[in-house]
Image (cartoon, rainbow, N blue to C red):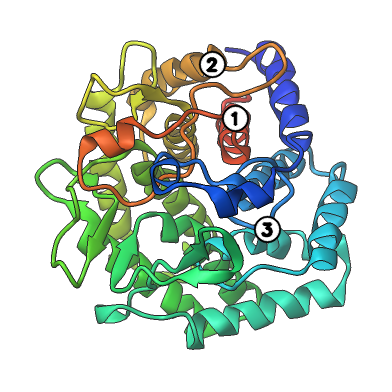
């Protein structure tokens, strides 16, 4: 697809993202366990809350603004931050780190010393106070269900999500402030997560690892979980490439290329990927497909992947565009997904418009612009 076809779709998706509104947060407190397991967590919906869905949403908007090379959405970012500061930030955890990724990239444009101070304090918190698993992995601590000021420890658990939600921020902070300890820790986290989540048989990533159970939970190859690596690792390398040891760089790139080769073979005729990658009876999921596409496009652009992957990416872009509604809603996006022990868990997650669905589609479509 050419720019003339893509830009109107991009702007519809962007407009919908910025106008997703809020959610009925009180309903969080009344959510049943079954609803929670299906991803019906009120604070996840909309664009207003300070949590991971909205944080990913902000990052997509930042990437679009960066594409234009100006500050056209800066008032939106400023308003979003101030509204959250007024009501008070939620508990510190892996997921609530996500908004900081956009903020640290916008510090020069926002020109607020207090935002810089927030970023610095949060990086120190990640280093010194976030619980760690065995092998010093970042434990996937999240916001408690029904209590934005509480936490759910997920003791001894590594999740693929952490790579995007937390490691990208720490990596950016380390390079921005020349903090070797932060840079080394971000790299360590990438390697620890590859060690425990990468499956050498399929060349895909498991959703998580439990040191307590000594297992990858249900051993499911979840689409969006894989996509956090496919796209997130390109963002990591973009910042870290000049400081990484060549051996470490090549190890990460080799892992990425192996995963993409496996994903290429699992692409559906529509151009998308199934929410359980290895189960063609599971629905095709657009947020994970978008992040996979964004990673492939970026890797082609910088020469990690060759031109033979262009057809795969172009097909995926067609599939994403086919799932953008007339009002800009990105369709067939699965809601927040906790750790599952079988394929049905992932197949039964509700489908709803989500800030990260809008955002990841934005990033993929912008990556396809010539």
How many other residues sit within 10 Å of disc 1, few (<14), some (14-19) or many (≥20)? some
Q: Where is residue 59 in the image (x, y as percent from the top left)?
A: 65, 49
Q: Is residue 325 left or right of residue 278?
A: right
In the image, 271 versus 300, the foreground residue is 271
Residue at x-position 71% and y-position 44%? 47
Q: Is residue 63 above or below residue 125?
A: above
Q: In this view, does 49 lie above or below 19?
A: below
In the rendered image, which quarter is residue 184 located in?
bottom left
Q: Is mark 2 on a helix, strand or loop?
A: loop
Q: Can residue 261 be seen in this view?
A: no
How many other residues sit within 10 Å of disc 3, few (<14), some (14-19) or many (≥20)? many
- Earlier sequence position, callout 3 versus callout 1: 3
Q: Position of residue 146 (x, y in %)?
A: 56, 58
Q: Distance from label 3 to label 1 (Cα)? A: 17 Å
Determine which of the numbered discs, if any, sits on residue 109 in the image: none
Q: Are marks 2 and 3 in contact (CB under 8 Å)?
A: no
In the rendered image, which quarter is residue 346 located in?
top left
Q: What element carries label 1?
A: loop
Please give the residue where the numbered disc 2 appears in the rendered image: 323
Residue at x-position 70% and y-position 53%? 49
Q: In this view, does 297 lie above or below 228?
A: above
Please give the residue where the numbered disc 3 appears in the rendered image: 50
Q: Nearer the viewer, mark 2 or mark 1?
A: 1
Q: Position of residue 187 (x, y in %)?
A: 40, 71
In the image, 207 versus 248, the foreground residue is 207
Q: Is residue 121 left or right of residue 260?
A: right
Please give the residue where the numbered disc 1 appears in the rendered image: 353
Residue at x-position 21% and y-position 63%? 196
């Amino acid at each position: 697809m050419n720019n003339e076809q893509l830009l109107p779709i991009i702007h519809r998706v962007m407009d919908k993202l910025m106008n997703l509104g809020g959610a009925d947060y009180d309903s969080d407190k009344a959510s049943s366990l079954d609803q929670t397991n299906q991803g019906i967590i009120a604070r996840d919906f909309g664009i207003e809350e300070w949590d991971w869905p909205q944080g990913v949403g902000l990052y997509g908007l930042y990437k679009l603004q960066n594409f234009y090379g100006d500050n056209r959405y800066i008032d939106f970012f400023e308003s979003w931050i101030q509204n959250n500061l007024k009501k008070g930030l939620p508990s510190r955890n892996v997921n609530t780190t996500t908004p900081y990724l956009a903020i640290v990239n916008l510090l020069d444009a926002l020109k607020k010393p207090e935002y810089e101070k927030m970023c610095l304090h949060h990086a120190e918190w990640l280093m010194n106070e976030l619980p760690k698993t065995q092998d010093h992995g970042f434990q996937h601590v999240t916001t408690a269900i029904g209590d934005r000021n509480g936490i759910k420890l997920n003791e001894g658990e590594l999740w693929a999500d952490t790579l995007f939600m937390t490691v990208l921020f720490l990596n950016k902070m380390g390079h921005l402030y020349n903090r070797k300890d932060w840079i080394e820790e971000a790299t360590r986290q990438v390697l620890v997560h590859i060690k425990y989540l990468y499956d050498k048989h399929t060349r895909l990533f498991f959703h998580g690892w439990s040191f307590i159970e000594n297992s990858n939970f249900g051993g499911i190859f979840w689409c969006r979980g894989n996509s956090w690596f496919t796209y997130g690792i390109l963002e990591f390398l973009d910042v870290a490439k000049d400081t990484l040891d060549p051996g470490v760089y090549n190890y990460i790139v080799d892992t990425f290329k192996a995963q993409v080769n496996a994903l290429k073979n699992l692409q559906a005729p529509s151009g998308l990927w199934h929410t359980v990658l290895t189960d063609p009876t599971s629905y095709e999921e657009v947020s994970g497909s978008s992040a996979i596409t964004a990673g492939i496009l970026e890797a082609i652009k910088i020469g990690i992947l060759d031109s033979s992957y262009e057809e795969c990416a172009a097909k995926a872009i067609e599939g994403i565009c086919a799932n953008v509604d007339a009002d800009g809603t990105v369709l067939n996006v699965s809601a927040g997904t906790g750790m599952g022990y079988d394929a049905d868990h992932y197949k039964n997650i509700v489908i709803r418009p989500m800030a990260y669905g809008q955002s990841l589609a934005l990033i993929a479509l912008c990556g396809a612009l010539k």
